[in-house]
Amino acid sequence: MRWLRKKRVLLVILVSFLFLLFFNTNWMSWFYPIHYKDEIRTQAKAYDVDPFLVASIIRVESNYKLSRESKKGAIGLMQLMPDTANWVLEKKQKKNVTLDELKHEPEANIEIGTWYLDYLSDHFDGNPIAAIAAYNAGQGNVGSWIKKGLWDGKLDTINEIPVGETRHYVQRVIYYYNQYKDIYKEF
């Protein structure tokens, strides 16, 4: 009988702990972590880009794995293509930053990726959905889709994006963006 009583007490303690854990902490952040928050926050503020969007792109591109290199050659957290990275470095007049640094230095990679995301947003008149698509497919491709009427660049017509990889990419970025906004409330 005494053993049963101890079991009940342990059960009550466990249930109380779980209750406190789930209702008094941000437990969902365990499943949707944001790494490099300071770097993301700094660069997002510098380029007036939503930090949750930057975090979402990093999550989809590299899952926060710093030195990741794709099969196509994209590098770092934000998976920048070398030609794009070199173009951005030239536009920003950052002659002292190398591709190797973009691969291994989170702040440098996040800065260049965030600048490029801001550039794409400006290019598409502040349309974040078109900018996300262009981050994956290139601004020329997305511009062509919109010009030809294949896609209007809007959130509610993502299913009309003519390339499956880009359609899925945009959907994933938006999914993580919404999760991050719900979980963290503010950055």
Image (cartoon, rainbow, N blue to C red):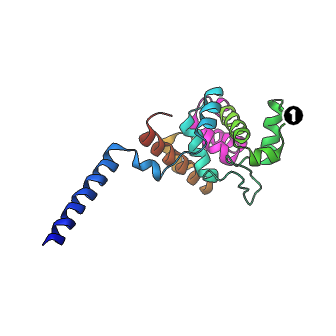
Name the dominant secondary structure of the magenta segment: helix
Q: Residue at x 40, y 49 (%)?
A: 27
> Which amino acid is tagged 1?
Lys
Q: Secondary structure at mark 1?
A: loop
Please determine whether, in this image, residue 91 is positioned above or below residue 34. Answer: above
Displayed quadrant of residue 139 = top right
Does residue 33 appear anywhere in the picture?
yes
In magenta stretch: residue 183: no
| Coordinates of residue 15 in the picture (x, y in percent) | 25, 57
Residue segment shown in magenta: 121-150
- Give the side of residue 145 with respect to residue 80, left or right: left
The residue beneath circle 1 is 95
| Coordinates of residue 178 in the picture (x, y in percent) | 46, 43
Please determine whether, in this image, residue 5 is positioned above or below residue 28. Answer: below
Front residue (pair 152, 8) = 8
Displayed quadrant of residue 1 = bottom left
| Coordinates of residue 76 in the picture (x, y in percent) | 72, 49
Q: Residue at x 63, y 51 (%)?
A: 61
Q: Residue at x 21, y 58 (%)?
A: 12
- Give the side of residue 58 with respect to residue 9, left or right: right
Count neighbours of disc 1 (C-alpha within 10 A) and say few if under 14, some if 14 to 19, many if 20 or more. Answer: few
